[in-house]
Amino acid sequence: MRPDAPRLTLSLTALLAASLWPQAAGAVTVSDNFTGGSAQLNWLVFGGACMTAGNGSGTIPACGSKDPSGNTQIGGYSGTLPDSNGNGALRLTNSAGSQSGAIVYNSLFPSSSGLQATFTSYTYDGDSGGSARNGADGMSFFLLTAIPSAVGSFGGSLGYSCSNVNSPYNGIIGGYLGLGMDEYGNFPNGGYYNDNTSSGPGAKPQNISLRGAGSVAASSLGTQFGRSFSASMVQSVCRNGNYNGTSVMNYPFISIPGTSGGVYQLPSSQPMANESATRRGQAVPISYKLKITPANLLSLWYSYNNGAYVPVITNYDINNTAVSGPLPSQITFGFAASTGASRNVHEISCFQAQPFTQSASSSGLNSQQTTLIRTGTQQYVASYHADNWWGSLASYALQGNTSTGQVSVASTATWDSSCVLTGGSCATTGTSNMNAQTSRAILSWSGSQGIPFQWANLTAGQQSAISPDGNGSARVSYLRGARGNEVTTLGSGLFRDRDSVLGDLINSSPIWVGPPQNNYQASWSDKLYPSASPAENATGAQTYPAYQSANATRTNVVYNGGNDGMLHGFRSGANDANGNYVATNNDGQEVLAYLPAAVQANTVQYSNPTYPHQYFVDATPVADDLFYNSAWHTWLIGGLGAGGQAMYMLDVSNPANFSETNAASLVVSEINSGTLSCVNKATCGNDLGYTFGTPVIARFHNGQWGAVFGNGYNSANGHAVIFIMLVNSSGAPSFYELDTGSGSANDPSGAGGKNGIYYTTVADLDGDNTADYIYAGDLFGNVWRFDVTGSTPSSWSVSQFGKGAASPLFTTQYTYCSSAQISAGSCTPSLQPITSKLLVTAIPTGNTSPRVLVSFGTGQKIPFTTNSADVYAGGTQSLYGVWDWDMSGWNTLTGQSAYYSQAAPPAA
């Protein structure tokens, strides 16, 4: 039990004043950001609730210099109140003990079409109260069936429910649903001697919890039972949930599926209150999104520090008289907070409520297009939905107008991969009832070979990692698309209830693989080594034109990495032998999927009913042709982006062979930072980071084919490195590393950050389809050139430009700060990182070496997490064009003149 302020009752004067405000029962959307001098809506005010930038107008008073108890108002935008107009918030409590405040919307909102409500909370400047040492009571948001004249008890009741311990024990009248944002932990603390009603698992600090309907107050009980109720009688009803044997709804605890005790507790890395913050800008914003559909299905998400929304409860049926019952046709809503014996500032901003049907139809709120690619006949659009994290890859036909010559895109999709895998109604194709695809070829990696992704085929170690709860076999079935173990609307089930079997498609772009289309010759020669005997010319070797002819009619497949743990391949028709498009199998059926071994353990989180968004296969792969073992092949190679430090390689030459039976031949290899070993450096796995870039497949001067990729972001060593994969005559890959040596000690800004390379560009300067140089930019803003003109891998190196050691061709602008300046906050280091592919253009110059122009832009985006939004590189970012021509005079110019002078081409 905690000492708290008494229950708050609205004054008659406030009721009369509020009744003069225009009512909004017919409004479609209501919103109030609370940032200005007055509230935008008509609110009833209880206790110390006030506007931090208030000017005395509107229905919520200005905060003033003191709270109702006489304590100085602190915090806000600048650290002292009042806030300037546009920088305010709704304050429910000042940072002092025994504070409480609440507001209730003084109108009824039409809810027959469901409801979506969103808002953002700030909790800061506290004294580390409670067992979690970071909170004072907390805040609540609630839905009511009628406009009340008073709010509920404070303490653990948070202004919503009745109290077992805090006189006069009354709860709010007309309560329908209460959301507790509970720092101290008593909102779910039910039981006879505990803080809150008769139900609940006990004290749980740092929690998000829910309570159902109730009207346990002296006046409402008196009306219900036809007699007066004393405070002790109200307390008895609250504690027991009945009066004289008649059950009374007393804000029953709603158990959240997939949580411990039915309470969602935030991880320790996400404290609800920032105790050391003294103003709002230092506090962590926590945003909430609550939805109730017209079918009475409740969903709730939160976003910490503008990060990804995390589901707390999804599609839970509250049409249960033991919980809340059907959503009324009209409701109102409100906020409340209290501090009890501890202290915290509690503030709210950016409130909005609208009907669910309106929010669901807003593509801007619910769907984000990530990538669009076009082929000759189709346009493919990848997108994702942040609500419950699912994705879509849809194909739209391109339509030509013979009269105007214009090409348009069909308004209705030919197919949508989400609908293909999930079944049911499909809005994008206009299909009312689709059958979900049930037969799938899903592959993985055992550590030594490709395997079917089936429970029986996983190694013992993989089974253990994917089954910490003993549900591994069922989890594999879930990942393969089975829906039977998903949490139901009544809260039963093992795994997360999915809107779609297809996960969100965010940073991985779709790639189309059809007939072989490279402009390769039948006979090969190496212009640097004309006496070499290319394996492509050997007797009996398949020529590239023969490979093209043999695969002219192979199935077109669109591949896309997904954050459901898999790379997916969807069929999209084919060409006939004459090159004409045939749409017979243009239906989006999945023909292949690959779930990397590197992400298997994380699928435990993906199936969690309260799944916090994670990345899995989130980088764009490449598919291209290469030669070995006297024949041509098409390989697909990709990384995981933020999903992991790994790369995978698949043989996708013949989609007719795609089956789990052929897993060993289809999966070439998978490497990760723990298993990668290079021929020239056994410990090169320490240089493999999160692989965001797309590899490049190429031929090299030693006669082998292979691929090049950057080492990515945040490797253990933190150097800028590229890897070259070579494929031997039997198709087995080996790896080489070219290390620039540029790591944290070389950070030109002085910040000591880690370096890395995202993308590489292969340059063939003499037109023989063999790599001569590789160019790449790094996170420090260096442009590197790698010399692979030698006929042996041991001769390949990082270019030195006459400096006797690996040196960059060019370095972008930066701001240097000393460690003392960084510690004092007097200087902000900045870089111009290069995280995109360099454009390399070779310009012929007669009998001399070609002049090479390297063009690129700078900048970096670190993808959002559950703890933060997308993070972009600070400072000024630029576009550059750099000549690679005068090795003796390069990089001798300094300052901005270097950028201008070297950007101009030399005289012919």
Image: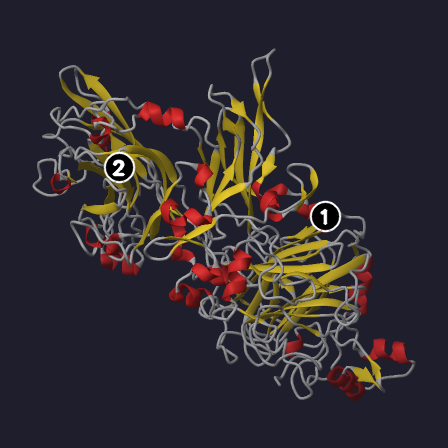
Which amino acid, mark 2? Asn
**Where does residue 130 sit, x and y in percent of width and height?**
52, 80
Mark 2, secondary structure of its residue = loop
Report the mark closest to the observer, 2 or 1. Answer: 2
Q: Is residue 901 left or right of residue 237?
A: left
Disc 2 target residue: 629
The answer to whether any part of residue 518 appears in the image is: no
Q: Nearer the viewer, residue 452 or 685?
A: 452
**Where does residue 47 sit, x and y in percent of width and height?**
68, 71
Q: Residue furthest right?
A: 226
Circle 1: is it few (<14), some (14-19), or many (20+) Cα within 10 Å? some
Disc 1 target residue: 357
Mark 1, secondary structure of its residue = helix
Which of marks 1 and 2 precedes in the sequence? 1
Q: Name the residue: 27% across, 45% down.
A: 732
Q: Nearer the viewer, residue 522 or 705?
A: 522
Q: In the rendered view of the protein, which quadrant contains the C terminus? A: top left
